[in-house]
Amino acid sequence: MSNTSQYDAMFSSVIGQDYDMLQLICPAATEMSRLVGNTVLAYPNGPEPLQAVELGGGTGVTTLALLTAKDDMKINSVDNEPIMQEQAKQRLKQWVDEGRLTFSADDALTALQQLANDSLDIIASAYTLHNFLHHYRGQVIKEIFRVLKPNGQFINGDRYGLDDIGQHTRMVQEEISQYFKVLTPINRIDLLEQWIIHLFNDESENHVMRETVAIQQLLEAGFSAITVSHRNAINALVTAKKPIK
Ligand SMILES: C[S@@+](CC[C@H](N)C(=O)[O-])C[C@H]1O[C@@H](n2cnc3c(N)ncnc32)[C@H](O)[C@@H]1O
């Protein structure tokens, strides 16, 4: 099975065309992109522009937060869903023209596998890794560790499932309720259907990224200084550093 076929192409549907609606049905997601950008702000500048890769840039919401957080950082934004990435290309043309932003249409693992050891300062992401199957995610985490420079940082704002499954389920139920509250009055039943289908994918046993398991995966890859912060229902910000040798 190829890497790409392990990814369920949910973002090629109406979700991808109307991804901006996520701001209404899940305001926490937009806030998380801002937090990912803020975290980069604290990363020390070097003599050269910082080199970053963004995994799952989507329509450019997180990319914009990263670009505006540090004006000397160069980003390669990776996303293997053209409907999403085309929107980012149009919105963020200014930064492409300035030479600060490039795009890769590879899937995350393939993009990382092409990079040299110890070559990046930052790998940032929002709401992408939870879409991965467990095995693929494990491979991606190992590659992130390999390509980061010593002291390089991994920053991920994402759905980190609660270890308390009962509490987790209640939060997902509230999330579904919010989808109905927002999308029914504006008669977007098509979008409601697709987001619920997508949520089943996110919550399936072979995808769900539970916090303790995810932290363990980072530890096993070699990361240190792992933090979990800004938890808001299912969402949390995770950071981790590659130790200095
Ligand atoms: C929920 S969107 C998040 C986009 C953006 N970071 C944000 O917060 O608005 C997830 C993105 O990850 C991309 N994606 C999912 N699996 C991927 C993979 N294996 N490789 C690259 N991109 C992937 C999807 O195409 C989608 O654009």
Image: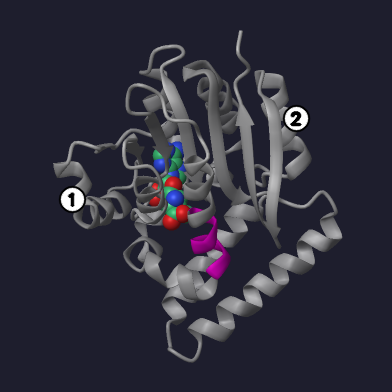
Residue 20 got which mark? Answer: none
For the residue labelled by badge 1, is the local secondary structure a helix, a strand or a loop?
helix
For the record, the magenta segment spans 27-33
Answer whether residue 25 is magenta in the image. no
Q: Farthest bottom residue?
A: 185
Q: Where is residue 12 in the image (x, y as percent from the top left)?
A: 35, 55
Q: How many labels does the image show?
A: 2
The residue indicated by pointer 1 is 93
Q: Is residue 9 visible?
A: no
Instruction: Please indicate whether residue 230 sits to the left or right of residue 27 in the image.
Output: right
Residue type highlighted by circle 1: Lys
Q: Position of residue 99 (x, y in %)?
A: 19, 36
The residue indicated by pointer 2 is 216
Q: Which of 91 and 214 is in front in this view?
A: 91
Q: Which residue is drawn at 47% across and 67% down?
A: 194
Above or below, 148 against 136 in this view is above
Q: In which quarter of the image is the C terminus?
A: top right
Q: Position of residue 30 (x, y in %)?
A: 49, 62
Instruction: Count residues near mark 2 (Cα–Cα under 10 Å), then give few for <14, some for 14-19, many for 20+.
Output: few
